[in-house]
Amino acid sequence: MGVLIANFLLYFIYFLFNVKGTGLLFKALLMMYMFVSLSSLFIWESGIYSFLHRNHIITNEISIYPFLYLFATFIFLFEPIKKFNESKIEMVVLDDKFRIEILGKLCIVFGLGLLVLLLLFVDYNASLENASEVYRDSEDGELAMPVFLYRLYTLHRLLYPFILLLGFYYLSFKSEFRFKTILLLVAAVIPKVFVSIVLVSRGGLFFIIIELMTCFLIFRRFIPQRTKRLLYVGSLFIVALLTSVVVIFTASRFGNSAFGPLMSVFKYFGESFLNFNSTFWGNIQEHPMSEFKFPFLYQFYDIPRTFLSRSDQYSFFSDMTGTNVLLFKTIVGDFYVEFGIVLGALILFLISRLFIKFVRFENTIRFSSLIPFLYYYELVFIGVFDLLWHGKFLFQLIVFTSLIYVFIRYRIKLGLAFK
């Protein structure tokens, strides 16, 4: 118990030392980490963790050293968010207004079109009534939607931060364009909610709440007071609705367990620190060295393996590492499993340095800079559980986001020279 209290105190004391001069986004991040550390204390002392993970635990005793490693690495990941104080933003400037507005209109058409297709081709009642079966089938490679919808939704996920941020920009600075604002927010959020329901993804619904919170906090100084009051009321409704769906999913997937749906939620929040400590730390037989999480990097020096389903992939790498790679282990834990204790922390350190250099933390901030920041904030916020993006989608995300960034940030003049 003393080790888990010490783990909580690491984040609590860090919070106290950094509470002044930082924004609400940074404070919300640290409060999330403190809550997770408290949840880990609860499920360990109550016996919930040891009962539910009895087949995966390698070490029955927890040590302070893995927690110190996590905390030290997380401090570097916190730094770009710590420097980004949203309360000091005086203006958000559109880089290339014409290009951004054109892209915004195309995104509205695409988002609403995807929404119509989802309503026509997907049975949502089946997911709500048989969440456990749908989730199991998806892990075995069975599709919950037609293939073309998966591909369209992948494109929507890549466009999503741009659409959402532009919706909040219009909400803040273009109050006269109410209809366009609503269309942007609907085109961004509703398809993602529907697909999360179809895929029985509690995490997907949780991410939506975090993304909406992040955008609201970035723009909150500029949102008209009357609109802000409506958002407060609407947020209560949205949170209540999404929470009810999560309860349905949880009851379907874990209703027959010894502790029931409520305790499974505590396990969801509290297990990542414990998993890293009792299952992964010091127990990796062989590090995949990017083949598992980053096959697009691995292919530079070897040929990645192919698998028929995700369950086959997870089984193979569980055998390779000697651990259950599906378990939450924090983003630091994911890099530790993938690359080892030194290289994993070094890569995360370099990523944090890159974002400090890449995103300009100024009083007047460019709209284009908010896109990578939103990605980074969500990556670190959800990083208390695991690595949010990996595999083929991560490669697509990096390439696509870079293209959007360049498209709206820079005016590239192309010309031909003739002799």
Image (spheres, rainbow, N blue to C red):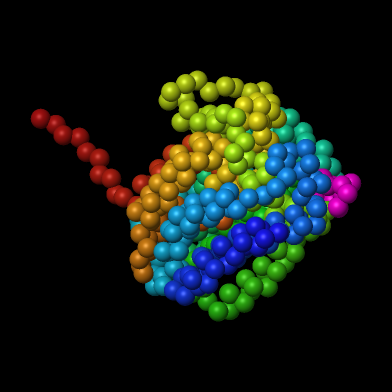
Can the viewer see residue 157? Answer: no
Indicate the quadrant where residue 183 lies. bottom right
44 vs 357, left or right, is right
Residue depicted at 36% across the width and 47% down the height: 406
Q: Residue furthest bottom?
A: 225
Count of numbered circles in the view? 0
66 vs 125, left or right, is left
Residue 44 in the image: state x and y as whole percent.
75, 54
Can the viewer see residue 406? Answer: yes
Residue 48 in the image: state x and y as whole percent.
80, 52
* 248 relative to 158, above or below: below
Q: Report the magenta residues as a range.
A: 245-260
Residue depicted at 52% across the width and 44% down the height: 158
* 13 relative to 330, above or below: below
Q: Quadrant of the N terminus?
A: bottom right
Q: Quadrant of the C terminus?
A: top left
Residue 417 in the image: state x and y as whole percent.
16, 34
Residue depicted at 65% across the width and 57% down the height: 3
Residue depicted at 80% across the width and 45% down the height: 52
Residue 360 in the image: state x and y as whole percent.
35, 59
| Viewer-proximal residue among 212 and 404 | 212
| Viewer-proximal residue among 284 and 148 | 284
Q: Residue furthest left?
A: 419
| Viewer-proximal residue among 51 and 391 | 51
Look at the image and say whether residue 311 sits in the magenta stretch: no
271 vs 170, left or right, is right
* 42 relative to 393, above or below: below
| Secondary structure that dominates the magenta span | helix
| Viewer-proximal residue among 39 and 283 | 283
Indicate the quadrant where residue 12 lies. bottom right
